[in-house]
Amino acid sequence: MNAADYVMLPWSIRGPTGKPGKYEMRIDELPDFVVHAGTIAEALYSFKRLLVAFIEDAMKRGIAVPRPNGPPVQYAVPARLPPTPPSKIAGAQTAGTNTTFSVKL
């Protein structure tokens, strides 16, 4: 299994949490992996790239990468309804004015 394969597994992801200028994201199974960012968008944008780099480094150094045990990642995205109703988008669930998409990273 390579790093890209590991990224697609259901990790227990925490975050982004924090306050403006100081956000972080973590993975329960990888206590040494932490993404620090100035904005929520930066944390989400850099998360996958940094996770791949972290896992590749561990594999190169012969460190065993644990198997994840979390559920698929879900994000609640408050937004205006898209032109296509959420019920017609694969993987979407609607609750009130929010739409939740299940995303595997």
Image (cartoon, rainbow, N blue to C red):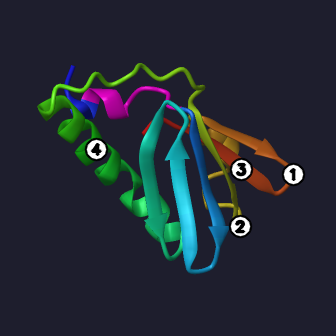
CA gap, disc 4 and disc 2: 35 Å
The residue depicted at 71 percent of the width and 50 percent of the height is 99
Magenta highlight range: 5-11
Query: How far from the left and from the top, in percent, is residue 44?
Result: 47, 59
Q: From the viewer's perspective, is residue 41 above or below residue 7?
A: below
Q: Is residue 79 magenta?
A: no
Look at label 4 and name its amino acid.
Phe
Residue named by callout 2: 80
Q: Residue at x 52, y 47 (%)?
A: 26
Please tell me how crowded label 3 is: few (under 14), some (14-19), or many (20+) other residues with Cα within 10 Å. some
Q: Position of residue 9 (x, y in %)?
A: 42, 26
The numbered dot on residue 54 is: 4
Q: Which residue is mark 3?
A: 99
Looking at the image, tell me whether mark 4 or mark 1 is earlier in sequence order.
4
Left or right for 24, reference 30? right
Q: Earlier in the sequence, mark 3 or mark 2?
A: 2
54, 101: nearer the viewer? 54
Q: Quadrant of the C terminus?
A: top left
Report which residue position mark 1 lands on. Answer: 96
How far apart in space, not on screen, are marks 4 and 3 (Cα)?
31 Å
